[in-house]
Image (cartoon, rainbow, N blue to C red):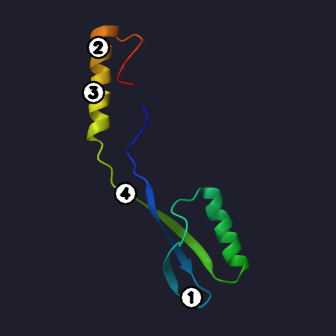
Amino acid sequence: MKDFTQGKAIKLTLTVKRPNGKVEQIVHPSLTFITEAQFKQIQRDTKAAGRGEVLSYEIERETVDNRFYKEQQRKARQFDNINNDGAEGYNPYR
């Protein structure tokens, strides 16, 4: 079953050290999620442009109510225990 423990990314915040020594928290205007490779590219490009050094990033995610998915997992385990005796087989809850 798919893991729904984390919600959708809603905000990307970058920590930037400017050339004058000031450290700023910047909310990216268009991106809400980046990979490690994209972060390294942002670091290189910012430094090459003389705009400072990107120190870190933080992805803020929306909160998720997992009660529905936990209930589906409980039903799936119950079905396996009763009908399949732990064996692989058809399960209507997956």
Instruction: Read off the residue under disc 1.
Output: 21
Mark 3 nearby-residue class (10 Å; few <14, some 14–19, many ≥20): few
Q: What residue type is labelled 4?
A: Glu
Structural distance between the alpha carbons of marks 3 and 1: 54 Å
Residue 59 visible in the picture: yes
For mark 2, what is the residue? Answer: 81
Name the residue nearer the viewer: 34 or 36.
Answer: 34
- Label 3 and label 4: CA atoms lie apart by 24 Å
Indicate which disc, 3 or 4, sits on the residue closer to the N terminus: 4
Point out the tag, 3 or 1, that comes first from the N-terminus: 1
> Which kind of residue does numbered mark 2 sit on?
Asn
**Badge 3 amino acid:** Arg
Labels 2 and 4: the sequence-earlier one: 4
Q: In this view, does 68 lie to the left or right of 25?
A: left
Mark 3 = which residue?
Answer: 74
Tally the numbered discs: 4
* Marks 1 and 2, how far apart at CA: 62 Å
First in residue order: circle 1 vs circle 2 = 1
Q: Mark 4 points at which residue?
A: 62
Q: Where is residue 22 in the image (x, y as percent from the top left)?
A: 53, 87
